[in-house]
Structures are given as structure tokens and as C-alpha cells.
Amino acid sequence: MKLPLRLRAFVWLTAAAAVVAQVAWVRAWKGDLEVDIMLAAVLVAFAAGAVQFQLMISPRVKFNITMAFYFAIVLLFPAPIAVALIVVSRLLGEGLLAARRNPLTGRSRRDSTSLLFNNGIYALAASVAAAAIYVVLRETPAALGSPARMVWAVPIGAIAMYLVYTVGVSCAAGIQLRQNPLRIWIAGRRKALVPEVGLYPVGAAMAIGAASFAWTPVLMIAPACVIYMTLRHTFRLQLVKQTVSAVEQLADIVDMRDHYTFEHSRRVADFAVRIAREMGLAPEQVETIRLAARVHDLGKIGVSDHILQKPGKLTAEERAAVQRHSRIGYQMLTGFPEYRHGADLVLYHHERYDGLGYPSGLQGDEIPLGAQVIAVADSVDAMTSDRSYRSALSLSETLEELSRGRGTHWAAAVVDAFQAIAKREGEAMVTAIEGSRLAGLERGEYAALDSKRPLRDELARKLELRPNTLMGIDTDVASAILNSLERIDERIQQLGEEATVDELTGVLRRRAGMLSLEREVAQAHRSITGALALAFIDVDGLKTVNDAHGHAAGDEMLREVARGLQGGLRTGDLVFRYGGDEFVCALREADGQTAHRRLEQIQSGLNERYGRNVLSVGLVSLRDGETADQLTARADGALYAERRIRRADHRGEMADILTVIEGSLAASS
């Protein structure tokens, strides 16, 4: 991934500052440069090992216990030697990290930019810390035995080292994430201030002890590890909450695509928990079922709106598209450790007890019990909610339907458990849950996805997944989540493009185009001029081209027309394929004359390519109060009138067009 220029410049600036500081120390140092080789080797080795164990404080800020060793090195050795030892230790540690590829992503754990920045920022922090210490001591490090001055020098050095490192890292993260570095710094300190600051007394204790016993750093590993493990446990708890929250928000967005299914997953989870408890399942099983039920329809992200909201019967192809959602959801969840048990329940929640379900046709006890529970809960909510193709069933009607499917569609034990709940709680149970759905709709919580934006961007905008949901996550687990989100993003983008873009021509499909046209019409009515021109365009003679030269030639002709329309209109103008050989173009802020001139230029280029007139155009301008459908109907009428005028000349023109195509095909062969 290519990094932003500003970030690369900042990395090189940091490295350059570290080099300048080191050169300054080498030139200015007047004291002794003798080094205890054994002590230096011990500190370098343990610091390099500590690099292997990291926690993510934010998407670009990590925590480990290396700073304790680095601070001890600064206190124990002459400044030029200390900085050099820290760089050597860092190179060794990060080299080991780079050699250990992440098993979840297959990628190297380090790249050249990270290596350069990390070495630069640690070296710079060490140089500044040493400078702060010597300003207070006014002596070389040989004066570590001077307690009076060390009481001041050590804290000041620690503060300097801490600020240079944390501010530098926050600035780099701010540049990369395009956020305020100060906010990133404050957020990181809220999460890790105590353990970060706690490493400096540990480092100071290492230095004081090592002055008389070289193996003191080994003894100090224990308190440093306690700090690390405490922070790791805290962040793992945060990880569970954040991951579940992010995935559940994804599921909510799926439900929000259609007001009939608004908060459907929440209600299914509520039903599933009640059923599971009624069946006497263990609390751990109940929680697994709740987590899975909450996201059971997550895979419907990959199903287009026109299928999900279709009022009539689905075709075989549409039904197959819907049935893929359980497998898509399963694939999405497998990247999240919190769903390692629940993912199977999502995969199999549409299996039937008699083996006639999908995706695998499991039968009876082959179906996981949690999936059987979710299947009943899902069906109950579907039956007790309005749908585009029918009104909601009453509770008694729902119970009758469950009884008919008991032992065939659904497991008998699960149906019996729900019936026991219904008998005890009655209609009030369904009424309460449905009431929460209606209250949500009244608050305006339902919001369909913007079909004009890429679905991936729309999800990112609504969820704000990055950086918030990766705060304070163990490095390997965070990599797995990020990798899963990237795969989801890629899949969502692919599905969004398949649903909205015409595969042949690369312009919008009819449904997506009409939705965009509705927005253009609404915007034009709100504008001062109210100007919007609409052209309904027909590609003349496409059938004749297909019959004479095959569909490949006809397809290429459609692509040429689409390219001509897109290239000839302004950025922001709308082009979509209405169907077959018909296209629609909406020209913003354009009156009839302006639109006519632009379309004539497009026609001229296509006519030159094919010999004569290729397009028939019906052009109209938006009227006050007119809807998108009315505007399209008028443009279609104008096209029909244009066709009648040109019909007399059509045969002669087609002969010329076919001649040009024959010549093109001969040249390409």
C-alpha cells in the first residue's frame, strides 16, 4: 500500500532528526566511552525480545515493555553509545518480527517505512532524554551514584523520552489517519498512561541495580511482564466488546435497508434467548446463540435491494441469491475470534429439520441446536411482522403455523419451548417487541443505504469502523480483524458494483439509474434555476448488427455508445442503461438548447465512427412539480416521435452502418 506523501516525508524527517542528534552527541561528547560489554549485550537482547510482544493502543500506536530497557540503557551508557545500542536492539527485534509472518494474513509484520520510523523515533527520544538528564546532572553518566541530582534527572529524562516518543507516534498516526494528532495522543494516554509511565521506574531500577550487578535486568523482567500482562488482559476485554459491537452494527445496517426488517436481528436475538433459556440451556450456550442470532442475516449485505424488497414471488435465480446470504455471513464471521462457535449457527440457521433446508441440507440432530433455536426465532419474527408481500400474522396464527411445521420444518423441542413461552406471556410478548420497532421508525432510525455511494463507503460512514473499533487490541488479533474487514470491504464493493453497474457497458443499471434520477429531479426542483434536461436514447439498428455480425459486434457497439455518452457529458451528469439498446442521460443545470448541443457533439463522434446516424434521441426539459417517472415517460414519448420522423431514412442508413462494421471486423481479424 502506497503511503501518503506527507507521511513518508514525516518518517524521513524523523529519521533525519535522529541522525542529526546522534552526530551532535558524537561530536560533543567529551567523557569516557568505555562500555560493559556483558551488560550491554544483556539489555540489547532482552529489549529485542520484548519487541516481539506488542499491544495495539490505536490502529497505528502500539505498546510493549521495550521502553523500560531503553530508559535503562540511556541511564547506564554514554549518550552516543546508548543511542547506538537502542538502534541495534530495535533493528534486531524488528528483524525478528519481519521474519515471523502473520499466520492470519500471510503478510510480513514489518515494512521498510515502519522500520525506519521506529528506529528514528526511539533514537530521537533517547537523544533528547540523555540531553535532559545531562542538563540537570552537568556531568557524565558516571555520576549515577549522586542521589541528590539523580532524583531530579531521572524523572526529567523520563518525561522527555516519553513526550518525544508518544507525540512523534501520534503525529505519524494523525497524518496517516487524517485526524488531529492531539486527539490521538490524548486518546492513547487515556488507555495506557499508567502502564506506559510505569515502565520508566522499572527502567531506572534496572539501571541502579545493574550498576553493581550486570544481571539485574533479568530480575526486573518480572515487574515489566506484570505490567504487560495486566494491560493485555484489559485490552482483550475491550477487544471482545468492540468486535461484537462492530459486527452487530453491520447487522443493523442490513436490517435498516428495509423498514419491514428494521431491528429484525435484535428481535430474533430476543426470541432466541427466551427459547434457549426455556429449554434449560447453559448460560454459555445461551450467549453463543444470542451473539449468532444478533448477526444471523449479516450476509444479506451481499443481496441486492430489489430482491430483498421485491413484493412478488422470487425467481429461481433470485431465490438462489437470497440463499447465499447464510454462507456469506459465515465467511464474514470466521475472521472474528468471538464468533468461532456462533459462525456455524449463522451458516445453518436456514436448515430444516426434515433436511429440505439450505445451504447443506442437514437433517435432524445434524443441525446444531443453536441453529435450530435461531430458525424458530427467525420464523416467529418474520411471521409476526409486516412484509412487502403480506401483513403480519397474529400470535395465534403464528402458533398454528409452527404446529404445522413441528418436526418437519422446525425441531419439535424448540417449537414446544416457544409455545410454552407464548402460553405464559401471550400476545403481550409480540406486541412489546413490535412496539419497539415502530418506535424506532418514528424516531427516524430507519435509513436505507445510499445507492449512489459505494456500499463499502456507506458502511464505513455509518459505522465509523476505523479507527475506533481497533483501539487497544492485541496485535495479532487486530491484524485478523483488519484483514477480515478488508475482505468484507472487497466483497461488499464487488457486490455493490454487481448490483448497480451494468456489466457490459460500465454505466449504471436501470434501477440504480432511476434512483439517481429521482435525486437529480429533487435537487433540480430545489435549485434556483430548476434546470434539468433528460434524453431518452435508442441505439438504432442494434438487432440488424447482431443478426449480421453476431452479438459480439452488437455488444461492442453498445460499449462504444456508453463510452461516447460518458465522455461527451460533464462530470456529474447521469448516464444509465435503461434496457436493451436504450440509454438515459440527465444533464444538470442544462436547458433544452444546451443539452441539444452536447448531444449533437456526441452523435457527431459516433456517426463518424459508424458512417451515419446511430442514435435516436428524445430530449425534454424538467417541468415544475414533475416526477422522475413522469419526466422519463415524456422523454420516451419524444423518442417515439423522433423515430417516426427518421423511419423513412432508416434503411439507407443501416446499409452504411453495416458496411462500416464489416470493415472493422475485417480489420480486426
Image (cartoon, rainbow, N blue to C red):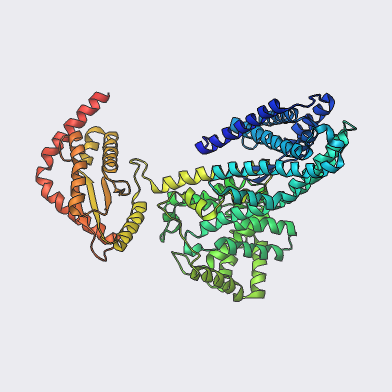
Q: Nearer the viewer, residue 195 or 360?
A: 195
- The quarter of the picture where residue 659 lies is top left
The spot of residue 225 in percent (x, y) is: 80, 42
Task: Write the residue at 62% across / 58% down.
Answer: 374
Q: Which of 306 and 102 is in front in this view?
A: 102
Q: Quadrant of the C terminus?
A: top left
397 left or right of 500 in image? right
- The quarter of the picture where residue 92 lies is top right
Residue 161 appears anywhere in the view: yes
The spot of residue 610 in percent (x, y) is: 19, 35
Q: Which of 635 and 260 is in front in this view?
A: 635
Residue 110 appears anywhere in the view: no
Q: Which of 88 and 602 is in front in this view?
A: 88
Can you name the residue that lies furthest to the right here?
212
The spot of residue 480 in percent (x, y) is: 63, 42
Task: Write the residue at 50% across / 60% down.
Answer: 256
Can you name the residue that lies furthest to the front here?
138
Task: Write the residue at 82% across / 44% down.
Answer: 151
Can you name the residue that lies furthest to the left here?
648
The spot of residue 236 in percent (x, y) is: 71, 49
Q: In this view, does 518 lie above or below 110?
A: below
627 left or right of 262 in image? left
